[in-house]
Amino acid sequence: MTVKEKLPKAELESQLDEALKDTFPASDPVSVGDVTADKPDRPIGRKPAKIDKALVEKLARQVAAKTKGAA
């Protein structure tokens, strides 16, 4: 059953009660319905891109030059 379908109030209350039990002690938000994705957005083992200081400084200078010209 999808969230868009109308549920009887008693069924909705039951699902909310179950969701509250599943999220105790309230570290997670309450969720009623199906899981939206069964796979992560990106591979779990993928490492973040390496960013070096020189690249960051170069990009910062480029942005600063563009913002000065726009002002």
Image (spheres, rainbow, N blue to C red):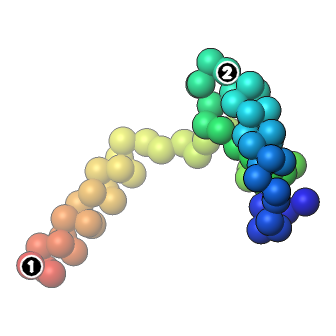
Whole-percent x and y of residue 62?
27, 66
Please state if 70 lies on the left or on the right of 4 as rendered.
Answer: left
| Residue count near mark 2 (Cα–Cα under 10 Å), binned few <14, some 14–19, many ≥20 | few
Whole-percent x and y of residue 64?
19, 65
Q: As rendered, which of 37 and 30 lies closer to the eye?
A: 30
In the picture, the disc for residue 24 is 2
Residue at image coords 76%, 27%: 22
Amino acid tagged 2: Phe
Q: As rendered, which of 35 and 33 lies closer to the eye?
A: 33
Amino acid tagged 1: Ala
Please state if 62 lies on the left or on the right of 21 as rendered.
Answer: left
Per the image, the residue denoted by label 1 is 71
**Helix, strand or loop at disc 1?**
loop
Q: Quadrant of residue 17?
A: top right
Whole-percent x and y of residue 10?
80, 47
Q: Is residue 58 above or below residue 65?
A: above
Q: CA distance from mark 1 to mark 2?
A: 52 Å
Q: Quadrant of residue 67?
A: bottom left
Please state if 12 lies on the left or on the right of 60 as rendered.
Answer: right
Q: Is residue 19 above or below residue 24?
A: below
In the picture, the disc for residue 5 is none
Whole-percent x and y of residue 51?
48, 44
